[in-house]
Image (tube, rainbow, N blue to C red):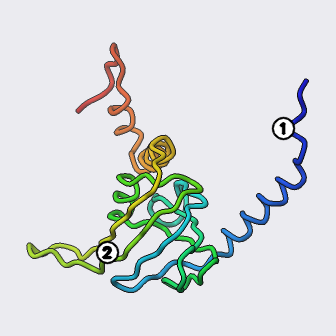
Amino acid sequence: MNNDFFENMDETMDKKATADKEAAEAPKFDPNPGDLLKAVLLKADAFVGGQYPPTAVITFKNVGEEAVGNVEPGKTGTLFASTVLRTKLFEAAPAIGQPFGLRFEGTVKPDSGGFSYKNWTVIGSGEDRVLWKGIAERIAGETLSPETQRSQNAQPGDTDWQL
């Protein structure tokens, strides 16, 4: 049996514990319109089961030369994605450990009325479609009622579903 996997396990566990602690204590990213964050994606996951609706949450390291949205250069930040940002993240699908850019375009009020929303631009240097598909599926699983889930997961021969 090859034990190379366990070779530096203590050091690896310590690094992970430190990264998890930094992520938990990271300041909330709160940019101003036009702010451009240059960052490396450290973690992306679905936030489910809380008092707020399910969404994506990302943890990143600011690799730019200036503070952006309360996150100093070289420091870690956290961002809970609004609906528009979540969609942009799913489209760009930034990969863990890879650089990405995130610019807050400002709050938009639709000409037709309706609700205002925060608009974003996201550009990633690498894609991880599997990661973001998994996050989307976890969010969808939390937001769909059991009846809706059953109709969306219908199989041939099922008789208890409706469109």
Tell me the SS state at disc 1: helix
> Which residue is painted at 43% across and 47% down in the image?
136
Q: Which mark is residue 118?
A: 2
Q: For label 1, count other residues whose C-alpha is less than 10 Å away and answer few (under 14), some (14-19) or many (20+).
A: few
Q: How many marks?
A: 2
Q: CA distance from mark 1 to mark 2?
A: 44 Å
Is 36 placed above or below 19 here?
below
Give the quadrant of the C terminus.
top left
Q: In the visual, does 67 lie left or right of 159?
A: right
> Which residue is painted at 33% across and 70% down in the image?
120
Q: In the visual, does 144 lie left or right of 96?
A: left
Q: Position of residue 15 (x, y in %)?
A: 80, 60
Q: Provide the residue designation for mark 1.
A: 5
Q: For label 2, count other residues whose C-alpha is less than 10 Å away and answer few (under 14), some (14-19) or many (20+).
A: some
Give the quadrant of the N terminus.
top right
Q: Quadrant of residue 107?
A: bottom left
Q: Position of residue 118 (x, y in %)?
A: 31, 74
- Residue in front for this viewpoint, 87 or 10: 10
Q: Amino acid at mark 2?
A: Lys
> Which residue is painted at 38% across and 29% down in the image?
153
> Which residue is painted at 72% across and 63% down in the image?
20
Q: In the visual, does 16 lie left or right of 124?
A: right
Task: Select label 1 or label 2 by which is in front.
Answer: 1
